[in-house]
């Protein structure tokens, strides 16, 4: 048996693989950070073996509740990801699997590699309605890709959607892929009507360095990008700096920040209720968008989520809070689960890339249905 993770988004350290019934593993922490929970590795020469993989440092991971009722994902072809038997005993995260092939990949959630990201950008720019711009570079020298759909025109509204500030939350880029696939479709009447009224800017991956390095939450120097929006700097958070500079030039009338949550088995939206400028108008906008989305897609719900911030208590370094306050617009954080979506379970895949993509489509429908009320 061989265990490896020396590939795009890979993360595991093999302690001992001499016994398939007790393969000892450890997750590598983000560089210059204590955060860890994301894992992605390959097991080779395992056909017809009953294997038990023990992640021995699971108790020290960033989010302990993330292991409760959690099942890891696996894939033979790196396209279809299915759930495998997983348990947590307080000492080890234990993954058990009998492989029908010689090689199998395991991950915390279905990975979205930087190679797939490059393919996504290339696919998008092939559409005449999409313009691609590199806003800057990361600390590792990777491009910060931004897609623009629609023509910049006086009178048009400006929509910004960013995703994957936390690189281990790969569901965010699967969501983006679904949205982009719809935006390039000239036969889609909802897309056509929105692009008649607005220009849409997308940053499918805010954290390329963390994504390639196999980080959970931070960039190449250990910065949590969703705590940098009040004062981004070239040495700590150039990713946020270049995107924020672009937003300042274009303005913003509606925004979304796409994430994943380790612990909660729900799709939900976190608003910006704690910002100084929050008022009844934006509360009505937020409530309307959430209720509309829940009617369109049963995978989304609004009964469960994060506690609502008290007035004036918002952390203004968060993306949604910073942008909502600066532009007096409705800006929301969409959270998706690493686990299955409670209420609409899928026994085989749990919450999956395919369902992430469909939720992206549904968010566009929700925006279309309540456009006049939620776009300032």
Image (cartoon, rainbow, N blue to C red):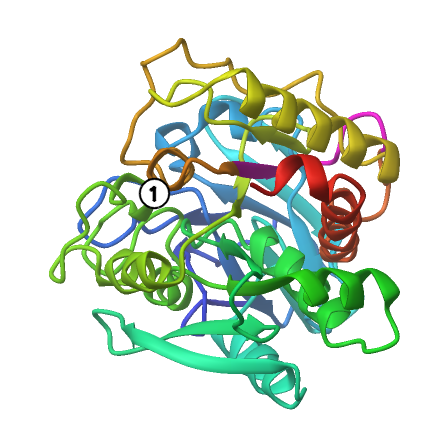
Q: Residue furthest top?
A: 310
Residue 336 in magenta?
Answer: yes
Quadrant of the image for the N terminus? Answer: bottom right
83, 187: nearer the viewer: 187
Q: Is residue 81 left or right of residue 173?
A: right
Residue 86 in magenta?
Answer: no
Quadrant of the image for the C terminus? Answer: top right
Q: Is residue 351 left or right of residue 57?
A: right
Occupied quadrant, residue 300:
top right
Q: Is residue 30 left or right of residue 139?
A: right
**Taking the image as drawn, is residue 180 in sight?**
yes
Task: Give the percent coordinates (x, y) of residue 184.
Answer: 73, 76
**Taking the image as drawn, is residue 337 in sight?**
no
Q: Is residue 146 depicted above or below 343 in this figure?
A: below
Q: Residue at x 67, y 23 (%)?
A: 287
Task: Give the percent coordinates (x, y) of residue 15.
Answer: 37, 53
Give the labeled residue for mark 1: 226
72, 306: nearer the viewer: 306
Mark 1, secondary structure of its residue: helix
Q: Is residue 204 left or right of residue 100?
A: left
Q: Which residues are magenta?
A: 332-344
């Amino acid at each position: 048996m061989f265990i490896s993770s020396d590939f795009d988004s890979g993360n595991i350290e093999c302690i001992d693989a001499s016994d398939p019934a007790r393969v000892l593993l450890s997750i590598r922490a983000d560089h210059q950070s204590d955060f860890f929970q994301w894992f992605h590795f390959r097991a080779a020469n395992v056909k017809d073996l009953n294997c038990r993989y023990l992640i021995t440092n699971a108790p020290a991971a960033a989010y302990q509740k993330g292991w409760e009722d959690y099942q890891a994902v696996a894939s033979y072809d790196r396209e279809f990801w299915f759930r495998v038997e997983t348990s947590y005993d307080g000492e080890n995260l234990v993954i058990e699997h009998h492989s029908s092939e010689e090689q199998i990949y395991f991950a915390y959630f279905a990975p979205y590699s930087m190679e797939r990201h490059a393919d996504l950008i290339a696919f998008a720019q092939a559409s005449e309605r999409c313009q691609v711009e590199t806003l800057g570079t990361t600390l590792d020298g990777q491009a910060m890709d931004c897609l623009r759909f629609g023509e910049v025109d006086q009178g048009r509204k400006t929509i910004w959607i960013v995703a994957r500030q936390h690189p281990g939350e790969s569901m965010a880029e699967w969501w983006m892929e679904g949205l982009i696939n719809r935006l390039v479709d000239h036969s889609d009447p909802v897309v056509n009507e929105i692009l008649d009224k607005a220009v849409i800017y997308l940053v499918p991956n805010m954290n390329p360095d963390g994504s390639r390095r196999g980080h959970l939450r931070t960039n190449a120097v250990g910065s949590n990008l969703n705590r940098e929006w009040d004062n981004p700097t070239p040495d700590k958070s150039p990713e946020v700096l270049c995107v924020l500079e672009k937003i300042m030039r274009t303005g913003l009338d509606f925004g979304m920040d796409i994430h994943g949550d380790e612990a909660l088995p729900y799709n939900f939206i976190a608003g910006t209720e704690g910002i100084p400028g929050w008022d009844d108008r934006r509360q009505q906008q937020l409530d309307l968008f959430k209720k509309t989305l829940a009617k369109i897609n049963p995978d989304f719900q609004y009964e469960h989520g994060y506690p609502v911030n008290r007035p004036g208590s918002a952390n203004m370094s968060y993306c949604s809070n910073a942008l909502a306050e600066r532009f007096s617009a409705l800006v929301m954080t969409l959270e998706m689960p690493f686990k299955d979506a409670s209420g609409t379970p899928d026994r085989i895949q749990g919450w999956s890339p395919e369902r992430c993509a469909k939720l992206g489509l549904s968010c566009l429908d929700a925006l279309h249905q309540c456009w006049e009320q939620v776009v300032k």
